[in-house]
Each structure stands twice: as C-alpha cells, then as structure tokens.
Image: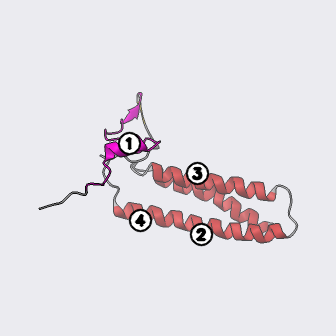
Amino acid sequence: MTTVEQNRSTRTEAAEIMPFGGWEITPAPAGFGDRETLFRFPAADDPAPAPARLLAMALYAATLGLAGVGVGVRAIVTVFGETAFWYVPALSLFGLASVALVVGSFLSIHRPALPWLLLLAATVPLAIDVLIAALY
C-alpha cells in the first residue's frame, strides 16, 4: 500500500505559484510557425538525453569553465598592476560570449549536432581570451 503526502504541492498548484513557464502540464509545441525551436528548456514529455552525451558535454563545458577561471585569475593579477583600458572589457566580452554559447549548447541538447557545434564555437572566444591574457 502506498501513502501520499497530504502537504505536497501538485504541478497544477506549482504552475499557479511560479512566475515563469517551466511548470506547464501540457506538452510544449514542437515549433514556432513553420520553423522548429532550436533553443528551449526540455518539456516534461521530452526523452532524456543519453547519459554518455550529457557526460561528454558536461566534461567539455567543465574544461572550458576551468580555462575561463584560469583566464580570470590571470586577469585579476594583471589588473592589480598597470593595464590598458581595453583589457578588462575585451576579456569580459569574449568570456561572456563563450558562456552564452555553452548555455545555448545545453538548451539545444535534443538536437543531433547543434550542441557540439556550439561547444566548439565557445572554444574560439575562450581561445582569444587565453591569447589576450598570455600576451599582455
């Protein structure tokens, strides 16, 4: 025999409380007009991504993140010295571009190749960050 908690919120109650659209009960529409949606949070009826795919993407993103932390530490040390006016904005711009591409890759995890292309594209601004930090 199973018991049900009396004070537990249901999904319909959570939908009324939460201010964003992440708790819908109905399946998400497959597309917007004639085009398919490329970036979206997974819906309740979406199949789970393969664990190996998720692990590989997470390891790739973690590697990018650790490289970004290294650039950030180098930037902090450099900023305490004398730097050019463009140094911090340039590092910030390329770092945020890399982060945005990584976020986009996880939002498109159900696509066959797009997440990998976005992760590879996130490497480019991060590589520019590494070069700026190493050369300056």
The residue beneath circle 3 is: 100
- The reply to whether residue 134 is in sight is no
- The reply to whether residue 84 is in sight is yes
The image shows residue 63, relative to residue 32, as above or below, that is below
The residue beneath circle 4 is: 55
The image shows residue 44, relative to residue 132, as above or below, that is above
Task: Inspect the image, locate mark 4, and give the three-letter code of the amino acid beneath it.
Answer: Leu
Whether label 3 touches label 2, CB < 8 Å: no
Tag in front: 2 or 1:
1
Q: Mark 4 Cα within 10 Å, few/some/many (few <14, many 20+)? A: few
Say whether disc 2 or disc 4 marks the residue closer to the N-terminus: 4
Whether label 3 touches label 4, CB < 8 Å: no
Q: Is residue 114 magenta?
A: no
Say whether disc 2 or disc 1 marks the residue closer to the N-terminus: 1
User: 19 or 27, which lies in front?
Assistant: 19
Q: CA distance from mark 1 to mark 3?
A: 28 Å
Say whether disc 3 or disc 4 marks the residue closer to the N-terminus: 4
The residue beneath circle 2 is: 66
User: Which segment did they paint magenta?
Assistant: 6-33
Q: Secondary structure at mark 4?
A: helix
The dot on residue 15 is 1
Image quadrant in which the C terminus is located: bottom right
Q: CA distance from mark 1 to mark 4?
A: 30 Å
Q: Secondary structure at mark 2?
A: helix
